[in-house]
Structures are given as structure tokens and as C-alpha cells.
Amino acid sequence: MILIPVKNLATAKQRLASLFSQPLRTELAQAMLLDVLDAVAACSHCFNVSLVTSDPFAIDAARQFGFDVIPDNHNRSETDAIEMATKNCEARGIAYTLVIPADIPLIQSAELETILANAPDRGSLLVPAADGRGTNAAFRRPAALFPLRFGNDSFKPHLASAQASGLPCTVISLPGIGLDIDNPSDLRQLVDSPGETRSQRLARQWDLTDLSPAANE
């Protein structure tokens, strides 16, 4: 089961608040979600997909793509949402979970295929964020092999938990999945990267000339 947590898009991307209005940030978050869903829909082995969300836009998008929704009624955090969804999957006897975020707009369906092709029969596979700090994909089989705790520095704790399980853990870097959009430098990389995703087309309409390293802090 692929799990995609989506928090309230109406308040998305607060780290860009000094540069762009909330309506623009929401529009970007919506575009990124659709880019992610496009890639998942194009993956030939991605049969079972659920968005973990209470956001109306995300729920409607899931229906358009034919994906399921696991209601996130509390809408507290990505960690809480995935913990709840993992228990849901475990109770249903689902063999594995693959958690990916909704803000990796350069994700490619081939990267998802790579994850599933390289995932161990029992164990885990992790894809770090481009900066090596975050975790942008986490595969677990069994589905609840170890708990996931997301945040800016989640990769090393996830790797430690995976290794502590005693089962194999594979780590691979994938450039599309690796880029999550949190700060101005990420946005600049999105704009400058090859491609014509919804998110890229949107961000290229904005004036990014004033982005500076200080804005990333």
C-alpha cells in the first residue's frame, strides 16, 4: 500500500510565507500533490494507493485518480497520520507500506518502480531527501516493521530503527523523489530543473529574482 499523507493545504508551506501569499502557497501545494499523483498513477506496480488526509482538495483529487482515502480526522501531523494509517493497513492484513510525501513534484513513476523492484521480501528501503536529512520515501515489509517519525532530520533515526529491526534495509538515492519543496532554494531548483510539471509551470510564472540564501533560514 502506498500512503501519501496530506495536511491542510489551506495553510501549506509556511516556510515560504515571507515571500508568497497563502493563496499562492496553497496553489503550489495543490499542484505538487497532483504531480505526485500523476507519477503514482503511471506506475504499473502501484496498485493500492491511499491518501491520508482530511483536506477537501486532496480528497477530491484521490477520487479523480481512483485512489482510496484514509480519513485523517485529527490533522495533527504527518507522523500521527502515518501512524494511524499504518495501524489501518496492519489491521487489514496489507503486506507492505510505502510512504511518500505530497511535496516531491519531480517524482518519476520509474523511481517508484525502482523502489518496489529493490525492496526486500522482508525489511525496509529508505530514500533520503537531497540534503540527506529528511526521509522522502519509506518502504516497510511487514507494513508496521518500525514506526516512522517525520521531520527535518528524520533519515538517521529511520535508518537506525530499520537496522534495529534485524531485517535488511536498503538505502537508495533518487533525484526526483529527493527534492521536496520547503524553502526558497528548493523552489529555485524546481524551476531550474528540466521538465514541465504543473508545479514547475506555476512557479515559473512567479518572480523569483529576489530569492537569497538568507531567505532559506
Image (cartoon, rainbow, N blue to C red):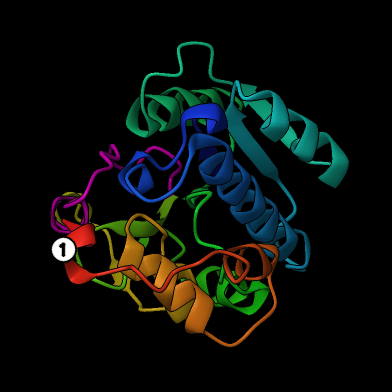
Quarter residue 13 falls in? top left
Q: Residues within 10 Å of mark 1 (few under 14, many from 20)?
A: few
Name which residue lies at 68% across and 45% down: 49
Image quarter where the N terminus lies is top right
Q: Is residue 139 magenta?
A: no
Q: Amino acid at mark 1?
A: Ala
Taking the image as shown, residue 61 lies to the left or right of residue 116, namely right
Name which residue lies at 35% across and 54% down: 182
Image quarter where the C terminus lies is bottom left
- Horizontal and vertical percent for residue 136? 39, 59
Taking the image as shown, residue 7 lies to the left or right of residue 48, namely left
Q: Number of labelled discs?
A: 1
- Which region shows up in magenta? 141-160
Instruction: Name the residue nearer the viewer: 76 or 111.
Output: 76
- Horizontal and vertical percent for residue 204? 59, 71
Quarter residue 156 falls in? bottom left
Instruction: Name the residue nearer the viewer: 142 or 138.
Output: 138
Q: Which residue is mark 1?
A: 214
- Residue 128 seen: no
Name which residue lies at 48% across and 50% down: 101
Q: Is residue 153 magenta?
A: yes
| Residue lying furthest top | 74
| Label 1 residue SS | helix
Q: Main secondary structure of the magenta part?
A: loop
Taking the image as shown, residue 142 lies to the left or right of residue 211, namely right
Name which residue lies at 62% across and 25% down: 55
- Horizontal and vertical percent for residue 108? 62, 74
- Residue 181 seen: yes
Quarter residue 151 falls in? top left
